[in-house]
Amino acid sequence: MTAWPYSTREWRDRVRPACLARDGHTCRGCGRHATELDQGETLIADHVTPWRDRLAQLLADGLPLAAARQLAAFDLAGLQTLCSTCSGRKDGPLARRLRAGERRRGMVPVR
């Protein structure tokens, strides 16, 4: 439906670094700083609400596509810094199944 935001120059050069800096290069899930991460772990700028869900909500509210895409993908207010471990917990198979089931029943997604 839309371009994947994580491969864009805006994400790489502006949005991700701004999110990590705002959060002090510290995971909001476990509180570890970037210097405390295990080998192979990294910090991720994570969408609190999946950006595609936010895009659909903004379009349903009547926002034009270009503005909705920009806001859904690149708005710092909708981002949090997570380590790869905490992000994996959030986006693991069980969490995805729960979110899908709750959407079908009209409930709010698990975050």
Image (tube, rainbow, N blue to C red):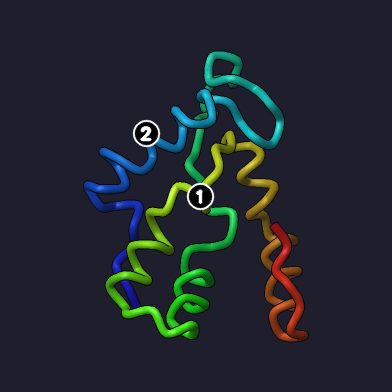
Residue 83 appears left or right of 14: right
> Looking at the figure, which quarter contains the N terminus?
bottom left
The residue positioned farthest toward the front in the image shown: 62
Could you tell me which residue is drawn at 58 percent across and 34 percent down? 83
Q: Which mark is residue 25?
A: none
**Residue drawn at (60%, 15%), measured in percent from left and top?**
36
Front: mark 2 or 1: 1
Question: Considering only vertical position in the picture, is 100 above or below 29?
Answer: below
Q: Amino acid at mark 1?
A: Ala
Residue 41: name its quadrant.
top right
Q: Position of residue 48 (x, y in %)?
A: 59, 54
- Badge 1 local density, few (<14 within 10 Å), some, or many (20+)? few
Decide: few, some or many residues near mark 2? Use Cα within 10 Å; few <14, some 14-19, many ≥20.
some
Disc 1 on helix, strand or loop?
helix
Q: Which residue is mark 2?
A: 17
Helix, strand or loop status at disc 2: helix
Mark earlier in primary sequence (2, 1): 2
Q: Amino acid at mark 2?
A: Pro
Residue 15 position within the rendered picture, expressed as x and y whole percent measured from the top left: 35, 43
Quarter of the image for residue 99 reads bottom right
- Measured as percent of width and height from the top left, residue 30 is found at 71, 30
Q: Residue at the spot x=40%, y=59% of the render?
A: 73
Frontmost residue, 25 versus 101: 25
* Picture residue at 76% right of the left edge, 69% below the top: 98
For the C terminus, give its image quadrant. bottom right
- Alpha carbons under labels 2 and 1: distance apart: 14 Å
Q: Label for residue 77?
A: 1
Residue nearest the viewer, comparing 100 with 74: 74
